[in-house]
Image (tube, rainbow, N blue to C red):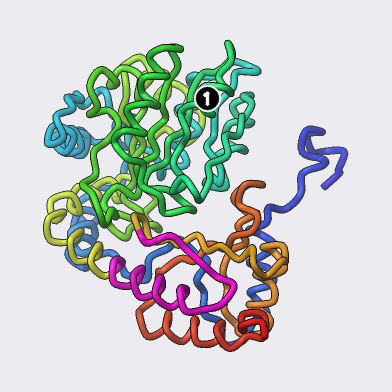
């Protein structure tokens, strides 16, 4: 992308692996798309209707740059239910969690500061760190450890430039849910070496074996935790682009100042929709969680029956990270063959960092009959037949 009117730092930039996948998928017929982390559920009609009424009533203007007070108060009440006391001014409403992640990184990093990224990782993290002039330091996690962070390996990559670690649990792409013991050990190292924990908890409502507890609720950690939340997955509101950051007041004020030159505030109608969604939390989330649990379990059983595929039992999120190392092929090649031979689109593990090679990510964001058809097609491929 070399051009005299583009910044030289972007001249050697290549399209992401995800962009390449979607370009190929656009040409596929009878496609079953298991690649997107975009739920097939629509935003609850009561939320959309209430937001429409708010729009007609005049919620069409700028809001406070931190977000409307009622929404920040409601989020603060949510955290108090976990024993964490955030005040409304400790919370900033953002245009999705990715916007919040970048604002937080921009606020805390000086040039050359390091951020530890357990990998396989959510694809945007490295670019967000580099945009803030930081350096991503990758910490591979292993399937044999349940994709949990190994504290001993973690401590080895800490340096005097370490400014933060990103902790994403439940995890995208692996589906791992960090144990309390793992979280406490990460927290102990953050306190010992005086760095921050960026807790990406956008899949917090999708845990199937344990209750979600935010990192900020662990003893002694609140001042060292930046909490990231989103309404995209928990309330099927991806298109509303609404999330939040909670943290120490100096951080939030710094983010607010930075954002005045970016978006100033999140959209008023999306903030109102988020407020209405929170009021329906106890009705909406259990139904969606159970639907995804059923889809994840059914997919797990299908995968277990397909030769040269394996996967850990579902723990959280709505992703399965499928081991295809027995094929002897690179993950992108396996992804491409599945797409060409079956019309099923998954993502190659390499899209989530080098540690993701040898895996595929499957998003269980379609109905059970569609999932069954997808696995029926995959199971019929010559690549996934038993070796005689």
Residue drawn at the location 42% of the way across and 63% of the way down = 38
**Direction front: furthest residue:** 388
Residue drawn at 46 percent across, 36 percent down: 149
- Compared with residue 260, is residue 25 higher up or lower down, i.e. above or below? below
Most foreground residue, 360 or 37: 360
Near mark 1 (Cα within 10 A), the count class, few <14, some 14-19 or many ≥20, is many
Residue 116 painted magenta: no
Q: Position of residue 198 (x, y in %)?
A: 42, 30
- Secondary structure state at the residue bearing disc 1: helix
Using the rendered image of the protein, determine whether residue 63 is visible from the camera's viewpoint.
yes
Task: Residue 9: give x, y in percent of width and height.
Answer: 78, 33
Q: Left or right: where does residue 38 sit relative to residue 297? A: right
Nearest the eye: 99 or 65: 99
State whether residue 55 is above or below residue 3.
below
Image spot of residue 286 (x, y percent): 17, 61
In magenta, the rendered stretch is 292-314
Task: From the viewer's perspective, tell me whether residue 124 is left or right of residue 61.
Answer: right
Q: Position of residue 315 (x, y in %)?
A: 34, 55
Displayed quadrant of residue 7: top right
Q: Is residue 105 left or right of residue 95?
A: right
For image coordinates 35% across by 54% down, the residue present is 232
**Label 1 belongs to which residue?**
106
Query: Is 299 a magenta residue?
Result: yes
- The residue lying toward the viewer, choosing from 196 and 355, is 355
The answer to which quarter of the image holds residue 349 is bottom right
Q: Residue at x 29, y 72 (%)?
A: 294
| Whether residue 243 can be seen here | no
- Which quadrant of the structure image shows residue 81? top left
Judged left or right of residue 115, residue 388 is right
Image quadrant occupied by the C terminus: bottom right
**How many callouts does the rendering have?**
1
């Amino acid at each position: 992308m070399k051009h005299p009117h583009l910044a030289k730092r972007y001249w050697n930039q290549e399209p992401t692996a995800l962009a390449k996948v979607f370009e190929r998928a656009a040409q596929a017929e009878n496609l079953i798309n298991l690649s997107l982390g975009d739920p097939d559920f629509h935003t609850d009609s009561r939320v959309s209707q209430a937001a429409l009424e708010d729009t007609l009533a005049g919620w069409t203007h700028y809001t406070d740059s931190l977000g409307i007070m009622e929404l920040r108060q409601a989020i603060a009440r949510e955290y108090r239910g976990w024993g964490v006391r955030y005040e409304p001014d400790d919370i900033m409403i953002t245009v999705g969690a990715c916007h919040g992640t970048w604002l937080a990184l921009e606020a805390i990093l000086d040039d050359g500061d390091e951020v530890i990224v357990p990998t396989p990782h959510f694809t945007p993290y490295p670019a967000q760190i580099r945009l803030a002039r930081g350096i991503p330091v990758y910490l591979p996690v292993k399937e044999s450890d349940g994709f949990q962070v190994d504290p001993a390996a973690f401590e080895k990559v800490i340096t005097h430039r370490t400014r933060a670690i990103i902790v994403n649990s439940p995890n995208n792409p692996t589906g791992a849910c960090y144990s309390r013991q793992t979280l406490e050990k990460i927290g102990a190292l953050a306190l010992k070496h005086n760095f921050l924990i960026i807790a990406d908890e956008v899949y917090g409502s999708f845990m199937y074996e344990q209750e979600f507890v935010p990192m900020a609720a662990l003893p002694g950690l609140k001042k060292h935790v930046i909490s990231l939340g989103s309404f995209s997955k928990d309330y099927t509101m991806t298109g509303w682009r609404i999330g939040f950051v909670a943290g120490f007041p100096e951080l939030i004020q710094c983010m607010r100042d930075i954002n005045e030159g970016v978006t100033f505030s999140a959209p008023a109608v999306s903030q109102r929709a988020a407020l209405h969604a929170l009021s329906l939390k106890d009705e909406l989330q259990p139904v969606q969680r159970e639907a995804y649990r059923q889809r994840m379990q059914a997919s797990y059983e299908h995968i277990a029956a397909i030769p040269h595929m394996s996967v850990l039992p579902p723990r959280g999120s709505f992703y399965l990270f499928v081991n295809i190392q027995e094929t002897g092929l690179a993950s992108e090649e396996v992804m491409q063959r599945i797409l060409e031979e079956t019309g099923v689109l998954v993502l190659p593990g390499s899209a989530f960092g080098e540690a993701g090679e040898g895996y595929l990510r499957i998003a269980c964001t379609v109905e059970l009959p569609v999932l069954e058809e997808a696995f029926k097609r995959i199971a019929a491929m010559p690549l996934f037949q038993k070796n005689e």
